Image (cartoon, rainbow, N blue to C red):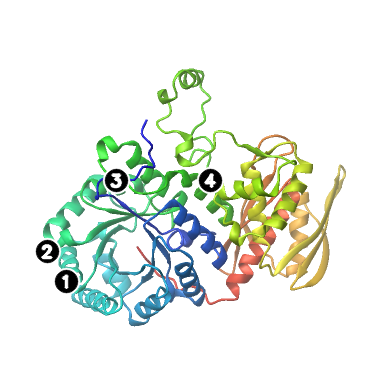
Amino acid sequence: MADINTKPAEADYVRIFDTTLRDGEQSPGCTMNVEEKINIARQLERLNVDIIEAGFAASSPGDFESVRRVADSVKGPRVLSLSRTREEDVDQALRAVDKAHSPGIHIFIATSEIHMKYKLNMTREDVLDAATWAVTRARKSLDYIEFSCEDASRSDWDFMAKICAEVVRAGATVINLPDTTGHALPEEFGRMFSYLREHVPGSDKVIWSAHCHNDLGLAVANSLAAVKNGARQVECTINGIGERAGNCSMEEVVMAMRTRHDLMGIQSRVNTRQIYPASRLLSQVIGQPVPANKPIVGDNAFAHEAGIHQDGVLKYKLTYEIMKPEDIGIPSNKLVLGKHSGRHAFADRLRHLGVDTNSTDLNKAFVEFKALCDKKKIIYDDDILALVTEEARRTTDHYELVDLRVSSASGSLPHAQVALRVDGDEQRAEAVGDGMVDACYKAIYKIVGLQPALERYAVKAITGGTDALGEVSCLLRENGMTVAGAGAHSDIVMASALALVNALNRLKGRTAMPLKPTMDVP
């Protein structure tokens, strides 16, 4: 079988526009801090994506700083900021990417009747003028301008043809047609691309892009239909995260084009062996586990339980596996290191897992690794990744877990004693609860003086065995803000406490900066 990571010989290929850091982050509980965004961006660079949409610079000072730092941190991919057709948006976006090796701007405005009437309160002429003005202004500073017709799948095609013609004339180099609400079906979405490419003067001089949401579970199918009808860019996210039901899944659309190259006739330039490390890294950063049945990267994606399937795979893998796990970066042997392993082997394994060792305290991580080796007989890749990510979560904490003691016995309520360091000052509290985790959480709430709603609490054994490293994720809501937290430890109560403290730190960080304005985006 040919190496699927060989770059296409033909000049024609599908560009991968990754919006994990912008549209993906808009998913409830997926907010990332600046350092986490930089780590994800560097992994996207290893993936060899073409474009990174780093954020929405005008939405908040924090987003501006994130875009600026990401733009300065990667050299390979082009870095863009999203922008409305407003003067302050365009100028902020341009400033945020001005230090990028390959800068760009992504300008959008809604073109559907429902959006223009009820959201923008603008006429078609107003929208046309605003779009042309914004692209013209950006063109004075940049050569790379993407323009999006927000809610394109519910827009009048002839009106979109008119507005696209004007922005192309003004200097737009990419035209994006988003299925903003996930409303389209593949056949109609593909025909829309064919129609506009035929009716927009100069359509052959620009790249046509598809940005699909997954409300009907068709984001990948719609993106592939767009590619079959001339789109040469797909906008997507790692693990398909994003608003509502999410965005087009990067790993799914990339591997669909690779696996069915016989029908698609075109593919991307993504280094597919970095897909699984990217998926795991994002999952750890945002504290949201990947569903076991998630295509490509889920734990069950290459698992076989049925006797007939097992028999077939043992005889010839292609009977039931259309891809090799190694092709997406899943190691054939997950057992990698033990207590006799050295620092060099440890650092090499971290790099293989997609961890940026330059921004990781290797000495501290190695000490934690050795301590884990003394507790566990077998150390797996996921143990190591969880350990390093857990260490990274503690670097800029307002709250730090110092000590946790819990007790439980039949006939008495579970009891917890907790010590937190709050801005350097150690504080203690104790509480009883319905269980040890409940008691622990109540004690922590006493110290921080908050009682947020716990909207989700999930426990996952990262690896097998009774000594497995456990990962806990939680979702908190306070004053209209939703944040996720995650923690990993061989003790599940300790992992629960770490997850809550991580979420509280995120909540504190978001409270300290202006909130993003509420707005619809592609």
How far is disc 4 from disc 1 in space, using C-alphas? 43 Å
The residue carrying mark 3 is: 224
- Label 4 crowding class (10 Å Cα cut-off): few <14, some 14-19, many 20+? some
How far is disc 2 from disc 4 in space, using C-alphas? 44 Å
Q: Amino acid at mark 3?
A: Leu
The residue carrying mark 1 is: 169
For marks 1 and 2, the one nearer the N-term is: 1
The quarter in which the N terminus is drawn is top left
Across and down, in percent, residue 362 comes to: 67, 56
Q: Amino acid at mark 1?
A: Arg
Q: Contact, CB < 8 Å: mark 2 with mark 4?
A: no
For marks 4 and 1, the one nearer the N-term is: 1
- Disc 4 is placed on an element classified as loop
Q: Amino acid at mark 4?
A: Val
Tell me the number on the disc at residue 244: none
- Disc 3 is placed on an element classified as helix
In the rendered view, tell whether residue 465 sits above or below residue 123. Answer: above
How far is disc 2 from disc 3 in space, using C-alphas? 24 Å
How far is disc 4 from disc 3 in space, using C-alphas? 23 Å
Numbered disc total: 4
Q: Contact, CB < 8 Å: mark 1 with mark 2?
A: yes
- Disc 2 is placed on an element classified as loop
From the viewer's perspective, is the residue at label 4 or at label 1 nearer?
1
The residue carrying mark 2 is: 201
